[in-house]
Every structure is written in C-alpha cells, then in structure tokens.
Image (cartoon, rainbow, N blue to C red):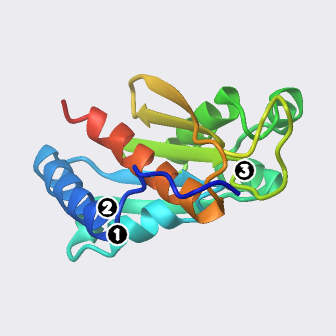
C-alpha cells in the first residue's frame, strides 16, 4: 500500500459539495439514483446525510456482486462475462439500468477494484469505471486510475469523482 494521496478529499469537503449539489439539483427539479459497486453505497450515504435530500435522492442501488448488477438493475450477465464487471460497458449498463429501475432523472454508476486484492495487470487495484446517464439523454463514461493508496482512499476518491460527474450535468 502506498501513501495517502495529497488530493484525498476530506469529509467536510465532500459534505459541502454534496449539499451544494443537492441544492442545484433541487432547483433544476431533477432526482438522482446511484448504482454502486466498489463504493458500497458511500455516494448515496453522503447525499442522504444532508437534510432535505429526499427531494433529490430518489434511490440507491448497492450492486456489489455480478448477480446483484443483473437482478437489481438489469445488467446482462453476458456483458459482465464478455467485458468484466470493471469495464466501461458494465458501468454504462449500470447507469442506464438504474434509470430504468427508478423514477430519477440522472444516474451515477461506479464499479472498480478497490483492493487490496482482486487486481490484475489489465485491471489493477485503483481502476474505477464510472458512468452517468440522463433519462432520455446521453450516457457518459469516465475511467480513473487512482493507483494503490489503499482501499479507503480509493473509495473516497471514487465518491469525489462521482460528485464531479453529477455536477457536470448542471453546467
């Protein structure tokens, strides 16, 4: 495990960003759904920590296993077998599936290798795939390679990136 990266977001910073994001979504009249694997619900937990979040956070799916991805949000097992759970294709299918299985307007999906094990040369620890989707609109993917600053750091960095992606719809 390497040192904690200097860009690791603080809880205070994440809370401030989440509160601002929720207010902006509230003003836009949009609702959010999350589909989380390696973050295990941290994004939904952060958002719902903010009072009044129920007017913006429609629901969250923790789809840690491949079976949960398939059963809860309709990610085809054939897609997981063909590309692996940590792939742009699966992240996009998670984001789109979360929208189909909710009443939200915008989704964010996260799937990655948080470690300490589970990595490979092709998909090392610290690789996280993200996708956001808008009902009736585009799906946007992002890949991040955080290195191996440790499981907790990877998960916090992924939460910050998920917020970035949700904020990008508000531009």
Quadrant showing the C terminus: top left
N-term-proximal mark, 2 vs 3: 2
Give me the residue at 82% from left, 35% from top.
84
Location of mark 1 (residue): 11
Residue 17 appears in view: yes
Q: Nearer the viewer, residue 1 or 154?
A: 1
N-term-proximal mark, 3 vs 1: 1
| CA–CA distance in space, label 2 to label 1 | 5 Å
- Report crowding for label 3: few under 14, some 14 to 19, many 20 or more residues within 10 A (C-alpha): many
* Residue 110 x, y percent position in the rendering: 57, 46
The answer to the question of whether label 2 and label 1 lie on touching residues, with beta carbons closer than 8 A, is yes
Q: Is residue 78 left or right of residue 16?
A: right
Give me the residue at 58% from left, 56% from top.
3
Quadrant showing the N terminus: bottom right
Residue 102 appears in view: no
The answer to the question of whether label 3 and label 1 lie on touching residues, with beta carbons closer than 8 A, is no
Location of mark 3 (residue): 69
**Where 130 falls versus 155 (above or below)?**
above
Secondary structure under tag 1 reads: helix
**Image quarter of residue 64:** bottom right
Determine the residue located farthest toward the left in the rendered image.
Answer: 27
Secondary structure under tag 2 reads: helix
Give me the disc on residue 14. Answer: 2
* Residue 22 x, y percent position in the rendering: 22, 57
* Residue 34 x, y percent position in the rendering: 48, 53
| CA–CA distance in space, label 2 to label 3 | 26 Å
- Report crowding for label 2: few under 14, some 14 to 19, many 20 or more residues within 10 A (C-alpha): some
**Image quarter of residue 72:** bottom right
Secondary structure under tag 3 reads: helix
């Amino acid at each position: 495990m390497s040192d904690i990266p200097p860009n690791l977001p603080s809880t205070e910073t994440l809370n401030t960003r989440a509160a601002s994001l929720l207010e902006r979504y509230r003003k836009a009249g949009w609702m959010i759904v999350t589909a989380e694997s390696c973050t295990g619900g941290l994004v939904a937990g952060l958002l719902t920590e903010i009072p009044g979040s129920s007017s913006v956070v429609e629901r969250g799916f923790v789809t840690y296993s491949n079976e949960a991805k398939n059963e809860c949000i309709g990610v085809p097992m054939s897609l997981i077998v063909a590309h692996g759970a940590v792939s742009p294709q699966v992240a996009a299918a998670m984001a789109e599936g979360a929208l189909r299985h909710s009443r939200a307007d915008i989704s964010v999906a996260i799937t990655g290798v948080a470690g300490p094990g589970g990595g490979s040369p092709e998909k090392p620890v610290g690789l996280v795939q993200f996708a956001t989707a808008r009902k009736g609109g585009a799906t946007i993917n992002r890949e991040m390679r955080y290195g191996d600053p440790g499981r907790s750091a990877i998960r916090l960095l992924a939460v910050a990136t998920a917020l970035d992606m949700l904020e990008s719809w508000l531009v």
